[in-house]
Image (cartoon, helix red, strand yellow):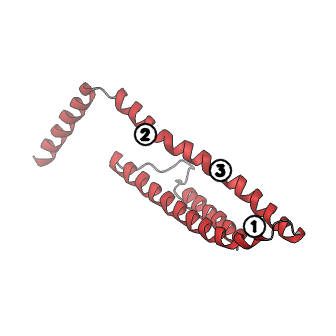
Amino acid sequence: HALALWARLASNRAGQQAMALSALSANGWRKEPESLCSRISETEATAHRLQEELSTILRGLAALKEQVRDADDLAGDTETEKIRQEVDDVLRRQGTVLEEMVKSAESFPRRWAQFELNISQRKSLLLSIKARRARDQAER
């Protein structure tokens, strides 16, 4: 059951990679969104997909914990030790990958903070003025 769960998660990732490839234009470049708000919406959707995947992983780990209790109770048995070793190897690799994901996710706020520091009030003011002028011209 545990290995089937991990296989299902891997197939989900393959499907997501295929979807990401379909977001490429005919010349191979990624299609750009029409606005920054669109980019933010895309990023939010991706974050929600990640959240769903993490929920699936947590549910799978809870189920796996229940399933391996018997294997832990029978520790020392040759057949049981093979199963325990196999599950332990998979969990160790997955734990390493999850740790890397945590580090990557933790870096997001720092990146946004750096971005905010690089945008001066003057640039924000100029953008507001230009946007207001464009709206005024569109209304005429």
From the image, tell me which residue sits under label 2. Answer: 109
Give the SS element for disc 2.
helix
Residue at image location 83% in from the left, 70% down from the top: 80
59 versus 96 height, above or below: below
Q: Give the image quarter of residue 74.
A: bottom right
Q: Position of residue 89 (x, y in %)?
A: 77, 57
**Residue lying furthest right:** 78
Mark-to-mark CA distance, 1 and 2: 40 Å
Name the secondary structure under disc 3: helix
Q: Badges 2 and 3: C-beta atoms under 8 Å apart?
A: no
Give the distance between the C-alpha atoms of the residues marked 2 and 3, in whole angstroms: 20 Å
* Cβ atoms at labels 1 and 2 below 8 Å apart: no
Q: Are marks 3 and 1 in contact (CB under 8 Å)?
A: no
Q: Amino acid at mark 2?
A: Pro
> x%, y% of residue 140?
9, 46
Amino acid type of the residue tagged 3 in the rendering: Val
The residue indicated by pointer 1 is: 72
Q: Which sits earlier in the primary sequence, circle 2 or circle 3? A: 3
Residue with the mark numbered 3: 97
Which secondary structure, mark 1? helix
Does residue 2 appear to the left or right of 43 in the view shown?
Answer: right
Which x, y percent locates residue 51? 48, 59
Q: Is residue 21 above or below residue 4?
A: above
The disc labelled 1 sits on which kind of residue? Asp
Q: Quadrant of residue 53?
A: bottom right
**How many tags in the picture?**
3
Which callout, 1 or 2, points at the residue further toward the start of the chain? 1
Mark with earlier residue (3, 1): 1
Residue in front for this viewpoint, 44 or 86: 86
> Label 3 vs label 1: CA separation?
24 Å
